[in-house]
Image (cartoon, grey):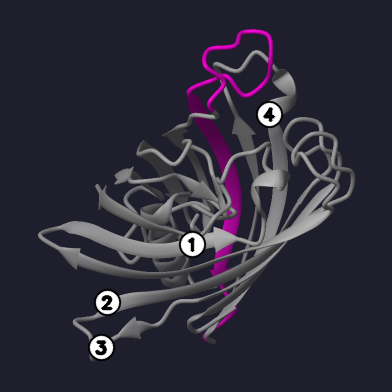
Amino acid sequence: MSNTKILTVAVTAALLAGTGLAQAQEREPAIVTGDTLVEGYKISANVALTSDYKFRGISQSNQDGALQGGFDAEFGPGFYVGTWGSTVNFDTNGDSGGCCNGSLELDYYAGWGNSIGDTDFGIDIGFIYYTYPGDNDTDADYGEVYVSSSWKDLTLGVHYSDDYYNGTDEFWYTYGDYSPTLSWAWNMVLSLHVGYNFIEENEGFLSSDEDGYTDYSVSLTKTLWGVDWAVAYTGSDLDDDDLWGYDWGDDKAVFSMSKSF
C-alpha cells in the first residue's frame, strides 16, 4: 500500500486496539509519513486509552480498560522498525504457576511498505514478535510474518506463525479491511474489518476442539482537538465454551482515544 495508506489503516487500528483493530487486529506499524524525512529517518510515537483491548475478536484485558503506546522509526525508502505495548489481564489472579499471568504485552516489528509505482496499489511485508515480559510461561511469546496489499481504501492481508501463542503450533490469519473517509459525515473514517483465524493444532489456545474462528468489527474514527476518537462494535463467533468459560469473544462496543507525536 502507499505510505499514506499504511498510516491511515494502522492508526485507525491502533485507536481500536490495537496495534487491531487491524494494529489492534494486526498491530502493523503506525508509520508516520507525508513529511520530508530528516537525515533519512523519522521518529514518531503514539499513546492510547481504550475501554477494552480486543485482539482478533478476543479481549486481552478481561474486558477492562487498557493503556497502550509505541514508538516507530521510518527509513527511506519504505523501511520501518518499531515497538508497541499494552497492559493486559487474563484473569489469572496472580497465579505464578501457570501461563498468562503477566500484565504487559510488548511487541517488536520491522518491515517494508510502499506503493507500486504511481498507482493506487501498494504492499507491506514484515515480521512482528509478541512478548509477555511478566509471564512465567515462555510459550506465550511468538513471532509472525505478514504481508498485505492494498488498493485505494481496500486492504487484504495474511499473517503466519509456525509456533503460535501458548504452544499452539502453526497459525494463519487472513483478513480484509475497507476504510473510506466519509466526507459527508465530518470526514469521519469508517472501518469495516473481517478476519479468519486458522489454528493447525489447538494445544491450549482455545478450550474447545475448534480449529478456527471468525472475528469482525465496524468502527468510526474522528479527529478533534488534536486527539483521535474512535468507537467500534467488535466481536467473534466464539462462545464461552471456546474461551475457558469467559465471554471475551462476545460482541462489544469499544471506545478509544489516541494521540500521535
Q: Which residue is mark 4?
A: 141
Q: Which residue is mark 3?
A: 183
Q: How far separated are the C-alphas under marks 1 and 3?
A: 24 Å
Name the amino acid, label 4: Asp
Q: How far separated are the C-alphas under marks 3 and 4?
A: 42 Å
Per the rendering, the mark at residue 188 is 2
Name the amino acid, label 3: Ser
Q: Which of pointers 2 and 3 lies earlier in the amino acid sequence?
A: 3
Question: Which callout, 2 or 1, points to the residue nearer the camera?
Answer: 1
Question: Are the residues at dot 3 and dot 4 in contact (C-beta closer than 8 Å)?
Answer: no
Evaluate whether residue 116 shows in this view.
Answer: yes
Segment colored magenta: 91-118
Question: Are the residues at dot 1 and dot 3 in contact (C-beta closer than 8 Å)?
Answer: no
The residue positioned 76% from the left and 39% from the top of the image is 207
Q: Which of pointers 2 and 4 lies earlier in the amino acid sequence?
A: 4
Q: At which x and y percent is residue 45?
A: 32, 43
Q: Callout 1 environment at 10 Å: few (<14), some (14 to 19), or many (20+)? A: many
Q: Which of pointers 3 and 4 lies earlier in the amino acid sequence?
A: 4
Q: Which residue is mark 1?
A: 234
